[in-house]
Amino acid sequence: MRGELPVDELNVCVIGTGMISDFHLQSYKRNNRAKLYGVYDLSLDRASEKAARYGVQKVFRSLDEVFADPEVDAVSICTWNHTHAELGVKALEHGKHVLMEKPLAMSYPDALQIADAASDPDIVFQVGFVRRFAAGTRVLKTFIEDGLLGKIYYAKGTQLRRIGNPGGWFADRSRSGGGPLIDLGVHLLDVCWYLMGKPEVARIKGVTFNELGNRGNVEALSFYKAADYSADRNDVEDLAAAMITFKNGATLMLDVSFSLHAKKDETGIRLFGKKGGAELEPELVLMTEQNNTILNIHPQIDHLSIDFDEAFGAEIDHFVSCCLDGGKTEAPLVDGIEVMKMLDGIYESSKTGKEVVYDQAEQ
Ligand SMILES: NC(=O)c1ccc[n+]([C@@H]2O[C@H](COP(=O)([O-])OP(=O)(O)OC[C@H]3O[C@@H](n4cnc5c(N)ncnc54)[C@H](O)[C@@H]3O)[C@@H](O)[C@H]2O)c1
């Protein structure tokens, strides 16, 4: 709604025009029901450069200006993690639809502040769980819903980077909330939990290490870097691992790193059920058994492993359609909050050395 009128084109403002904003800007540009109405960044130069590149109508000079503009229907929030909760709350208070980059917030209590501000059911709040929208995930989910895997009792998410600390704010805990766990682990935890049917968490044991630092000395390997890259500061973990047990008894193992003496970078997302299994990464494949024979099933789809262009396009098309057509988002705020609770649990367990117990597990 713009004022009280339903709209058939969504005016979007992208807040934060650093590295990830390109995926948002290009996806909105390709969507013929969205209009790139505005951009805003603390760096006016960066916002102006992106506005020129993507043909955005307005470069805002302040956040207040963005939120006060009645022509802005929706915002994509692509800023540093420590700003997410405050910006999310403000956007909701001004009646804007929100696509919030992951992680939802810096912490579970911060995430709950957003929940308090989300009182209008007609306002869409979508969390940037881009892996939910990737072609492979969408296909796998249909097979899981058809029962091919049966009850999923074990899952494993891995994203190990040998050198991959994006530096700048990512490595500054006061702005990021943590290292590879909150940055990469959030995606793996989410997509496994989502495909497992979003079971309720019962217990978490987590560990984090800061043994190698950011390996800023390593040469001749390129990696994702924050727009304001600097390797000078680093107070985040470089490896995190966790075991999450759910009330239905299912268990999820997770390990993620920014720096590690590993042979190569790797991403693995694996789910194991009573009737079958699946690998989503490195490449979609389904496993089952029939006539006393093990079958590995290879779906024939364009993107067997995640293609970020495709996945962000699907994520943003879905967001635009929910805003304009009033649908329920596939990545709602409540899920962002639950994932934030589990991330906090891993950090908490790592700090105390003890398991975090949420409730008596019902086996
Ligand atoms: N979905 C994904 O796969 C994915 C990948 C990378 C990053 N991200 C998320 O996207 C967000 C941004 O990451 P990035 O890699 O683009 O970082 P970045 O540092 O490259 O860009 C962030 C931009 O936000 C701006 N900014 C910070 N605070 C602001 C504020 N209060 N108002 C306006 N602008 C502000 C900065 O000036 C910068 O230009 C993070 O939350 C990150 O976790 C998601």
Image: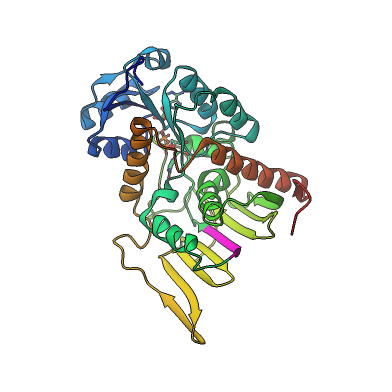
Task: Give x and y (percent) for residue 278.
Answer: 48, 67
- Whether residue 156 is visible, yes or no, is yes
Residue 335 relative to residue 311: left or right? right
Magenta-span inclusion, residue 157: yes
Would you say the magenta stretch is mainly helix, strand or loop? strand
Dividing the image into 4 quarters, which one contains the C terminus?
Answer: bottom right
- Whether residue 21 is visible, yes or no, is no
Magenta-span inclusion, residue 225: no
Task: Give x and y (percent) for residue 138.
Answer: 40, 55
What residue do we see at 43% from left, 59% from top?
142
**Looking at the image, residue 238 lies above or below residue 232:** below
Q: Give the range drawn in magenta.
A: 151-158
Ligand 1 quadrant assignment: top left
**Looking at the image, residue 86 lies above or below residue 172:** above
Residue 188 relative to residue 314: left or right? right
Quarter where residue 74 is shown: top left
What residue do we see at 49% from left, 86% from top?
291
Foreground residue among 12 and 15 = 12
Quarter where residue 330 is shown: top left
Task: Give x and y (percent) for residue 23.
Answer: 33, 40
